[in-house]
Amino acid sequence: METKLNIMPVYNLSGNKKRPVIISGPCSAENESQVLATAKAIAKIDPSIIFRAGIWKPRIRPNSFEGAGAEGLGWLQKVKKETGMKITTEVANARHVEECLKHGIDILWIGARTTMSPFAVQEIADALKGIDIPVMIKNPVSPDLQLWIGAIERIRQAGINNIVAIHRGFYTFGKSPFRNDPDWEIAVELKLMFPTLPVFCDPSHICGNTELIPYISQKALDMEMDGLMIETHILPESAKSDAKQQLTPLQLEELLSKLVVREPVSQNRKFIDRLAELRLNINKIDDEILRLLMSRMKTAREIGRYKKENNVTILQAARWEELLKDRISSGQMMGLSEDLVKRFYRIIHEESVHMQSEIMNS
Ligand code: PEP
Ligand code: MN
């Protein structure tokens, strides 16, 4: 199902065409002095940074800090007035939207837990009808692209033109160095489906700690993401939410100064010629791969027919295990990873088994 959403680029979010758009600020607005001290330190780095702070915090367990509530919106207004930065916060229901509009919030975002719920997203969409405000939509907690697209469509259908998707990683049960697995393929798929939809990345919620943030931020830019949302706190160790993943303003400054912004294309003649040459090579190699694949499948079909004639089963576990072991070791000698060879042969084997079972049943 593909809907053509007419989504406008949003580089004007921060008042200029700089890429990437940077959004930064604390996980939560805790009190006025924490908000203002953090905002002033960020504005000193670059006043075109958009200031974020959670006002209503979705917490997994009750009795944790659930945000300052509407009072905190006044602190954000003060940030806007004193630093000139644009301000953004998370909304999860119609009342949040109304409060934000009353307090001059420039950009809204929908959090991962809200994107999970079509009822909640629709309620927000209804509250936004006839209003022109940019909305950023985080991916749902689970790796479900359709749910993400559905939320984007609901907001678009409410008449919102300026929409941004934010990739903040996906929950996985089990071991991962990340708090939320990046699963880049889902974000790339979204970009391919909606080429004009800007996609930002939220390295803070992907990583869950500060160490991995530079790596994920650079990777996001290398994947042509248009912006980064990074949590920064004036005193991270005292933060009331997400203390482990927030940067100090100094760390933010260092991170931004080290990011390499690569261009999707280069005008350099030498680069263009060499790239064309390499791509030609890739085309030839792919042609060879396809020919070999065709020839392999033809042989597998022949084996299938031969097995049928001789009343022999299709799946021969011992042969498959032996083959895979052999290919992995050959691949390793050629510098190919075990994982790649395994995944590659699994696909081929699956297709061969499928083909042979069709022959058996024909
Ligand atoms: C946040 O931005 O602080 C937040 C709660 O994020 P997410 O919805 O991605 O968990
Ligand atoms: Mn947070």
Image (cartoon, grey):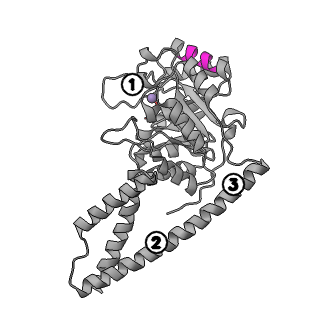
Q: Which residue is mark 3?
A: 275
The image shows residue 91 at horizontal and vertical percentages of: 49, 35
Q: Are marks 2 and 1 in contact (CB under 8 Å)?
A: no
- Which residue range is magenta in the image? 35-43
Q: Nearer the viewer, mark 3 or mark 1?
A: 3
The image shows residue 213 at horizontal and vertical percentages of: 50, 30
SS at mark 3 in the image = helix
Dot 3 or dot 1, earlier in sequence: 1
Q: Viewer-proximal residue, 34 or 63?
A: 34
Taking the image as shown, residue 72 lies to the left or right of residue 195, namely: left
- Say few, some or many: other residues with alpha carbon within 10 Å of mark 2 (under 14 / 14 to 19 / 20 or more): few
Dot 2 or dot 1, earlier in sequence: 1
Residue 106 in view, yes or no? no
Q: Viewer-proximal residue, 314 or 44?
A: 314
Q: Which residue is mark 1?
A: 66
Kindly identify the amino acid type of the residue bearing the numbered disc 1. Answer: Glu
Q: Which residue is mark 2?
A: 293
Kindly identify the amino acid type of the residue bearing the numbered disc 3. Answer: Leu
Taking the image as shown, residue 342 lies to the left or right of residue 361, namely: right
Calculate the distance from the C-alpha at mark 2 to the C-alpha at mark 1: 57 Å
Query: Is the magenta region chiefly helix, strand or loop?
Result: helix
